[in-house]
Image: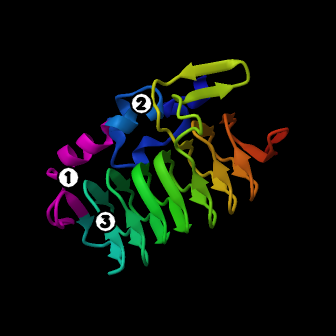
Amino acid sequence: MEECKVCNLYNLEETIAKELLESVTYPWEALSKINDYILELGNKLDAEKYEKIGEDVWIAKSAKVMPSAYIHGPAIIGENAEIRHCAFIRGKAIVGDGAVVGNSTELKNVILFNKVQVPHYNYVGDSILGYKSHMGAGAITSNVKSDKKLVVIKKGKEQIETGIKKIGAMIGDEVEVGCSSVLNPGTVIGKNSNIYPLSSVRGVIPPNSIYKNKNEIIEKR
């Protein structure tokens, strides 16, 4: 499944996690490495641009963090990022430059590329969101199957056994996810695609697509 590979989903020049993602073929293979990568990278960050706050939390001095936000380490908050009222960052999170983590949004074990927006009541767990991707209000990633079995990435008759229990969504660059959508465990969305509001999405969505429902996925013109 070529469209699921890191090189086909993301512009790695738009994340501080470039080195980590270059070390894997598929993005979900990086999920177990986020914690250690942050700890290693955090101590190398430019002290003129970043300040270490508490235990293993590095926040860019240009970032805007509301007093009511909660950030648990390890975490890196990039330059000019915005962490809004009551955001809940549970740890193992990289928030890219210019990204927005909105009111009551929850993050856990994630990489948000530069200029990602998760601005209103979103849950993003065990997921990687590409450059300028946007999740509408109430859209969430579901990261554990109801039967608690290991996640399998599926595209028609093709499938990849991940060997991982928790995988949310791998969202390519400049993807738009509509309000109140649910991205089921192991969802992969190709670059420049749009997901209709109120969608329940699973499997692999090709790049440059419009997802209306599971039976109606059309190519952008």
| Outermost residue to the top | 157
Give the quadrant of residue 203: top right
The kind of residue on which mark 1 rests is Gly
Residue at coordinates 71% horizontally, 51% vertically from top-left? 194
On whether residue 67 falls in the magenta region, the answer is no
| Vertical side of 158 occupied by 211: above or below | below
Residue at coordinates 20% horizontally, 47% vertically from top-left? 39
- Disc on the earlier residue, 2 or 1: 2
Crowd band around label 3 with a 10 angstrom C-alpha radius: few (<14), some (14–19), many (20+): many
| Disc on res. 42 | 1
Which residue is identified by label 3?
71
Point out residue 187 in the picture as x, y percentages from the top left corner: 61, 39
Point out residue 207 in the picture as x, y percentages from the top left corner: 67, 39
| Vertical side of 90 occupied by 137: above or below | below
**Distance of label 3 from label 2 (alpha carbons):** 24 Å
Quarter of the image containing the N terminus?
Answer: top right
Residue interval drawn in magenta: 33-58
The kind of residue on which mark 3 rests is Ile
| Disc on res. 29 | 2
Choose mark 3 or mark 2, whichever is in front: 3
28, 59: nearer the viewer: 28
Residue at coordinates 62% horizontally, 59% vertically from top-left? 139
| Vertical side of 36 occupied by 91: above or below | below
Quarter of the image containing the C terminus?
Answer: top right
Choose mark 2 or mark 1, whichever is in front: 2
Point out residue 156 in the picture as x, y percentages from the top left corner: 73, 23
